[in-house]
Amino acid sequence: MVAHRGDEQLFPENSAEAFLSGARAGADYVEMDVRRSSDGVFVIHHDDNTGRSVHCAPGDVAIAKADFSYLRSECLYRDLPAEKGQILTLAETLNLLRETKTGLVLDVKPVIKEHEMADLAEELLRLDPQGECAKGHDPGGTYNCFSNIIIYVNDLTAHDRLWRWSKGLENADVRYRVLGAMKFLKIVHNGSAALKDPAKYLDNDGIAFNMKPTSVEDIQALRKQYPEKILAVWTLGKKEEFDLARELKMDGIITSHLHDYLAK
């Protein structure tokens, strides 16, 4: 079970409170959206702009056009006190959840491109600052030397570059090899697209796709033809989609209604 943007059933999406609540509730993974500010800081926020879940007092802005100091000092999640309502950086979020037993799903938004993958890799390596994973020593915590992290980079060219670096298929900093323990999934809106173009979508560990437009027949075909691949679906909140995903034994079910479904 993946808590979509954290426990957004009880707290504002992508906030520290949502992530911690999802972990406490028993989600297997919490999902978070990764963007970048104008000065290069990786931040956790879903929309292109502030204004819906986060409000900035002087005026709402595009995340990519605001520097992080503005986002930190002037913007707060709605319905949270100031001390708990700040936009988080990716590094802060990773450290916030380090000692939980909950895995992480990093949904890297399509505005982050291929030339930014080295910066993203460096940010992830901050989880293991002493390089213990490369030495074969697991420093502990939720990450298990990156094996409990799922990542999908929406820009497929960027995704492929990070994956190839982490698997040693392209020349890159050898430190990136430890990131190969992550599960790399590709985003595809309709699972049938992956069936039509498996070389494009099914060359990594699996796919994440929308349950609603994907037929049962296509899901069954995916499972039959690619039994070793991870098939994760987002249902968000519809009971009938969730029940079907369970019936079809999806490997991951991404939902906004965490407590409704954990109670079943």
Image: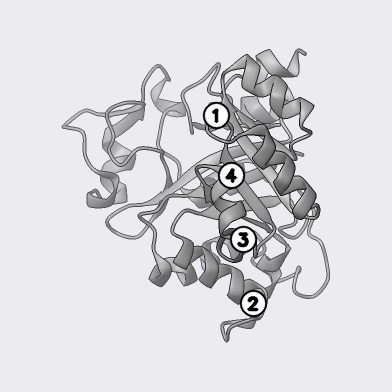
The residue carrying pointer 4 sits among few (fewer than 14), some (14 to 19) or many (20 or more) residues within 10 Å by Cα, namely many
Q: Residue at x 74, y 36 (%)?
A: 250
The quadrant of the rendering that contains the C terminus is top right
Alpha carbon separation for disc pair 2 and 1: 39 Å
Q: How many marks?
A: 4
**Residue, x 66% and y 80% (percent of image)?**
168
* Secondary element type, mark 3: helix
**Mark 2 or mark 1, which has the lower sequence index?**
2
Real-space Cα separation, disc 1 to disc 3, in angstroms: 20 Å
- Checking the image for residue 212, the label placed there is 1
Residues at circles 2 and 3 in contact by the CB criterion of under 8 Å: no
Taking 210 as reference, is 86 left or right? Answer: left
Q: Upstream in the sequence, badge 4 or badge 1?
A: 4
Residue 175 badge = 2
Q: Give the structural element (helix, strand or loop) at label 4.
A: helix
Tell me the kind of residue under disc 1.
Answer: Lys
Residue at label 4? 191
Look at the numbered disc 1 and give the secondary structure of its residue: loop
Can residue 126 be seen? no
Q: Residues within 10 Å of mark 2 (few under 14, many from 20)?
A: some
Q: Which residue occupies 49% across, 33% down?
A: 14
Mark 3 nearby-residue class (10 Å; few <14, some 14–19, many ≥20): some
